[in-house]
Image: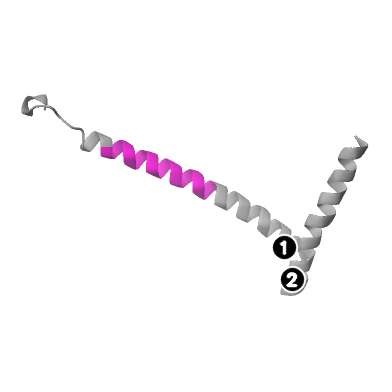
């Protein structure tokens, strides 16, 4: 477990350093930058899933409308 905590500390230190430097450059609080990254992650993941559902729905509708019929009597 000691290796896990060392790795966790290292990643947190380096990751939070990036947020701190961005916040200093923009002149805002570090906490705002961190929460913004979290919210943007959820938004982008949600957008991808919504796009997937929309395309699946569109393809299903297209298949229902444009089904190829072998004969005029298949109606």
Residue at the spot x=62%, y=51% of the render? 41
Which of the 4 quarters of the picture holds residue 73?
Answer: top left
Indicate left or right for 43 with 64 as reference: right
Label 1, label 2: how far apart the Cα atoms are: 7 Å
Q: Quadrant of the C terminus?
A: top left
Describe residue 18's horizontal placement relative to residue 42 as left or right.
right
Instruction: Assign the N terminus to one quadrant of the image.
Output: top right
Q: Is residue 73 above or below residue 13?
A: above
**Residue 21 percent location from the top left of the image:** 78, 67
Rendering coords of residue 55 (x, y %): 38, 43
Dot 2, crowdedness within 10 Å: few (<14), some or many (≥20)? few
Residue at the image point whose x is 82% and y is 52% from the top: 12
Q: Residue furthest right?
A: 2
Residue lying furthest top = 73
Residue 3 percent location from the top left of the image: 90, 39
- Residue 1 lies, with reference to residue 30, above or below; the image says above
Residues at circles 1 and 2 in contact by the CB criterion of under 8 Å: yes
Secondary structure under tag 1 reads helix
Q: Is residue 59 left or right of residue 65?
A: right
Q: Residue at x 50, y 43 (%)?
A: 49
Asked if residue 53 is positioned above or below residue 28 in the image, the reply reads: above
| Image x and y of residue 22, in percent | 74, 67
The dominant secondary structure in magenta is helix
Which residue is found at the position 47% from the left and 45% from the top?
A: 50
**SS class, disc 2:** loop
| Residue 27 appearing in the image | no
| Residue at the disc numbered 1 | 32
Q: Which mark is residue 55?
A: none
For mark 2, what is the residue?
28
Q: Residues within 10 Å of mark 1 (few under 14, many from 20)?
A: few
Tell me which segment is drawn in magenta: 46-62
């Amino acid at each position: 477990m000691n290796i896990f905590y060392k790795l966790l500390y290292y990643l947190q230190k380096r990751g939070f350093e990036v947020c701190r430097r961005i916040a200093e450059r923009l002149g805002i609080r570090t906490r705002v930058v961190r929460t913004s990254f979290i919210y943007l992650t959820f938004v982008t993941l949600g957008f991808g899933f919504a796009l997937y559902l929309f395309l699946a729905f569109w393809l299903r509708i297209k298949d229902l409308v444009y089904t190829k019929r072998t004969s005029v009597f298949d109606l």
